[in-house]
Amino acid sequence: MPSKRSIAVPEARQALQSFKAEIAKELGLENETAAGYVGGHMVKRMIEEAEKSLTHLGRS
């Protein structure tokens, strides 16, 4: 079983890094040093996008 901090899909590492930088910029952070804070917002955004996706599927 992968450790808690490992990425399940290694090929997604660059996309996750880009997403992390995007969220940090939106929050007005110079860099991603506040990892927990940025990570929390990343999860929030991913959940919002998943909910939108599910809503669109229900309307098809």
Image (spheres, grey):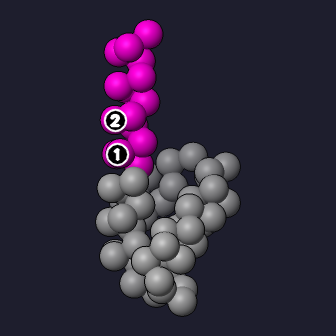
Question: Hey, what amino acid is under mark 1?
Answer: Ile
Q: Is residue 34 left or right of residue 11?
A: left
Label 2 near label 1: C-beta < 8 Å?
Answer: yes
Question: In the picture shown, does residue 30 fall above or below 8?
Answer: below
Question: Quick one: 46 or 5, which is closer to the camera?
Answer: 46
Residue 46 in the image, given as x and y percentages of width and height = 41, 49
Instruction: Give the position of the C terminus as an image quadrant.
Output: top left
Q: Residue furthest top?
A: 60
Question: In the picture shown, does residue 21 fall above or below 33?
Answer: above
Residue 26 in the image, given as x and y percentages of width and height = 49, 73
- Tell me the element at label 1: helix
Question: In the picture shown, does residue 11 fall above or below 13?
Answer: above
Which mark identifies residue 7? none
Rendered residue at 54%/86% (across/down)? 31
- The residue segment tinted magenta is 46-60
Q: Quadrant of residue 44?
A: bottom left
Q: Residue furthest front?
A: 59
- Pointer 1: what residue? 47
Which mark identifies residue 51? 2
Rendered residue at 42%/42% (across/down)? 49
